[in-house]
Amino acid sequence: MQIEKTPLADCYIIKPQVHHDHRGYFFESFNALKFKELTGITTDFVQDNQSFSSYGVVRALHAQRAPYAQAKLVRVLQGEVLDIAVDARLDSPTFGQHFAIHLSAENQLQLFIPRGFLHGYITLSKTSVFFYKCDQFYHKQAECGVMYNDSDLGIDWKVPPADRILSEKDLVLPRFNEVYKKTL
Ligand SMILES: Cc1cn([C@H]2C[C@H](O)[C@@H](COP(=O)(O)OP(=O)(O)O[C@H]3O[C@H](C)C(=O)[C@H](O)[C@H]3O)O2)c(=O)[nH]c1=O
């Protein structure tokens, strides 16, 4: 496992060590001890999620409010996505900034997104299977989110707007500054 810092504190890129042989490949998709050694972060994942999407589907930008905030370890099992993490920690020097990364079954990269972040992704391939570990259970009443294309966040979602597909819920999410009450 190799860890790479991002410009957002506590948000890390993880590159697993892939063992290839004549049969195919093997890699440890997560190892809590190695992760702690490399990041100093102790994780206790309690729920795994998986979602299937078609090209252009946007699932963004979501979080759960404290005390049910979730850290997530995300990766792609099939296809390719553009994954977005937005720092929504009011006391963070990178408050309001985002990090974007291409995750794919081919590059096998993962992104660790700490609690206090908004998260979302758009599918760039014909279809995608997205898998992620969470360190807090789903609490529907604690769900929150902001509009994915809020100009204040300046996220380039790559896919032409006409091709993007969103849930009814995501189409009516508020602006970042409405939720986080702090001007960027
Ligand atoms: C998140 C979640 C949802 N659900 C149920 C609720 C709905 O009946 C159905 C679809 O939920 P939703 O439309 O919120 O799914 P996404 O739009 O993919 O939401 C996710 O989008 C981005 C990528 C995230 O990082 C979050 O984990 C999550 O908000 O699954 C559950 O039963 N458990 C859960 O943990």
Image (cartoon, helix red, strand yellow):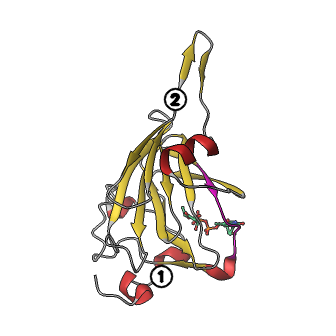
Viewer-side residue, 20 vs 61: 20
Label 1 packing within 10 angstroms: few (<14), some (14-19), many (20+): few
Disc 2 residue type (three-letter)? Gln
Of callouts 1 and 2, which one flags the residue occurring earlier in the amino acid sequence? 2
Quarter the C terminus occupies? bottom left
The residue identified by callout 1 is 172
Q: Residue at x 42, y 75 (%)?
A: 88
Does residue 107 show up?
yes
| 137 part of magenta stretch | yes
Viewer-side residue, 95 vs 83: 95
Q: Residue at x 62, y 33 (%)?
A: 28
Looking at the rendered structure, the secondary structure element under dot 2 is loop
Observer-side mark, 1 or 2, equals: 2
Q: CA distance from mark 1 to mark 2?
A: 41 Å
Q: Position of residue 87 (x, y in %)?
A: 40, 69
Magenta part of the chain:
131-139
Viewer-side residue, 44 vs 53: 44
Looking at the rendered structure, the secondary structure element under dot 1 is loop
The residue identified by callout 2 is 17
Q: Position of residue 140 (x, y in %)?
A: 68, 77
Q: Is residue 54 above or below residue 65?
A: above
Q: Residue at x 44, y 84 (%)?
A: 174
Rendering quarter of residue 154: bottom left
Q: Position of residue 26 (x, y in %)?
A: 61, 25
CB within 8 Å, label 1 to label 2:
no
Does residue 125 show up?
no
Seen as rendered, the residue at the extreme top is 22
| 138 part of magenta stretch | yes
Q: Position of residue 72 (x, y in %)?
A: 57, 58
Q: How many marks?
A: 2
Disc 1 residue type (three-letter)? Val
Rendering quarter of residue 25: top right
